[in-house]
Amino acid sequence: DAGVTQSPTHLIKTRGQQVTLRCSPKSGHDTVSWYQQALGQGPQFIFQYYEEEERQRGNFPDRFSGHQFPNYSSELNVNALLLGDSALYLCVSSLLDMDSSGNTIYFGEGSWLTVV
Amino acid sequence: RKEVEQDPGPFNVPEGATVAFNCTYSNSASQSFFWYRQDCRKEPKLLMSVYSSGNEDGRFTAQLNRASQYISLLIRDSKLSDSATYLCVVNVYNQGGKLIFGQGTELSVKP
């Protein structure tokens, strides 16, 4: 059973460009959340998708957008890239009604984005 | 004020030492609490959940004090392999299961 898969694993973009990151959740999971982790910081919540809709959003500008497909996979899009967008982007797969054990939350290995 | 705050690091300790990490959270609606471990350039991995009754897993002990909104992690008999960043994480149910992370505390265990 595959866990959470993210692609690409590493990429380099130029300021002003656009990027799309992809995530396939663990089989059976219906909820995908995206986090941004800058160097030396903890992950910061970007948004969460369930049933193809954005359920919740963190404090990120509209340049950050997303999508969830009927198969529960998800994309994170960032437009007009800034140097400060350089970070590890983590996809988290879960069930909407997750228990309190933490064992139903699965992280992908992340996508490293460098903006130059 | 950050929603989840951790001790600033790094912590540099010799092998065999006992080290304690502290964490405070601001949202009283917080429902679930975790410690995650993150190795350099890797994704976070669940170390243990934290319960009000306290819980232990081998050399690791976690405590939760809801009244003080405080979480701790104690590592006994530190090993070189414990070197990593430790993240305090809170889940607030009325925020739809969003995970809120502390900034992490780096631990370096030296021979």
Image: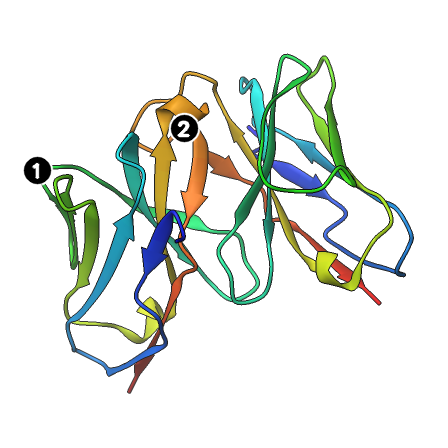
Of residues B6 and B27, the one nearer the viewer is B27
Q: Residue at x 88, y 46 (%)?
A: A18
Horizontal relation, residue B81 to residue B70: left or right = right
- The answer to which quarter of the image holds residue A50 is top right
Q: Residue at x 20, y 44 (%)?
A: B69
Tell me which amino acid carries mark 1: Ser
Q: Residues within 10 Å of mark 1 (few under 14, many from 20)?
A: few
Of residues A75 and B56, the one nearer the viewer is A75
Which mark is on residue B102?
none
Q: Are marks 2 and 1 on the same chain?
A: no
Q: Residue furthest front?
A: B1
Which mark is on residue B53?
1
Q: Residue at x 47, y 63 (%)?
A: B39
Q: Position of residue B70 (x, y in %)?
A: 19, 49
Name the subunit of mark 1. Answer: B
- The answer to which quarter of the image holds residue B8 is bottom left
Horizontal relation, residue A75 to residue B61: left or right = right
